[in-house]
Image (cartoon, grey):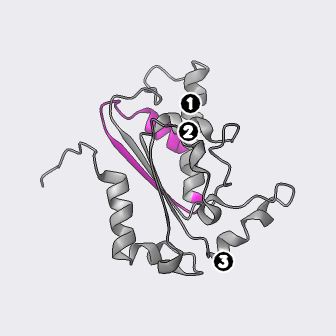
Amino acid sequence: DGHYLAHLLGFMEPQRPVALMGYSFGALIILEGLSELVELEQNEALRPSMQPWTHRSARTHMVLVAAAVRCDAFSPRGPYRGALQCVDRLVLINNSRDDALKHFPKLDPCMRIEAMGYAGMREAWVPSSLEYTSTDASTIIGRHHGLPLYLSSSSLTRRIASGALEGLDVVKVLP
């Protein structure tokens, strides 16, 4: 799915702002897609009709909610560090009590690494050029794992929407 997202994003005009929001394993799809775009660009393998993503003129915002991604994904040697080159803003909404994400280390027993959506990540890994915020939603969501829970909270919905859209020059289309 990340490959298909990369293909779709590669055809976006560089002057068109983009907001990406991924919940749980949707965060992994976004990171795979952005990483593929970076890799294609570095290897000069972008198709002639595809646009580069590391130097876009428009802003790109990424909101990851209860991300089922390893917590060191953006570390200096992390598997998705390159994806940060594609975004201007990163908003993480985590849940340190999420029962489903608590079991994330069992997906790869050799690694035994926590999920970013459960443990968060080190702020030191965020490039200074990137707008970054992180919120622990555990007091609102509790031990549950489900996007409707996040969207039924007005404060979390506002945080998701403002993280994704605030500051983007979005053209309104009238019916």
Residue at (61%, 75%) from the top-left corner? 98
Give whichever of discs 2 and 1 has the lower sequence position: 1
> Residue 134's spot in the image, x, y percent?
49, 58
Q: Mark 3 near mark 2, Cβ–Cβ under 8 Å?
A: no
Task: Name the foreground residue: 47 vs 21.
Answer: 21
Q: Is residue 2 visible?
A: no
Q: Mark 2 near mark 1, Cβ–Cβ under 8 Å?
A: yes
> Residue 4's spot in the image, x, y percent?
54, 43
Inspect the image, locate mark 2, and give the three-letter code of the amino acid beneath it: Ala
Residue at (60%, 81%) from the top-left corner? 143
**Residue that lies at the very extreme toward the front in this rendered image:** 124
Q: Is residue 94 left or right of residue 11?
A: right
Snapshot quadrant of residue 156: bottom left
Residue numbers of the magenta segment: 1-25
Q: Residue 83: which disc?
A: 2
**Location of mark 1 (residue):** 38
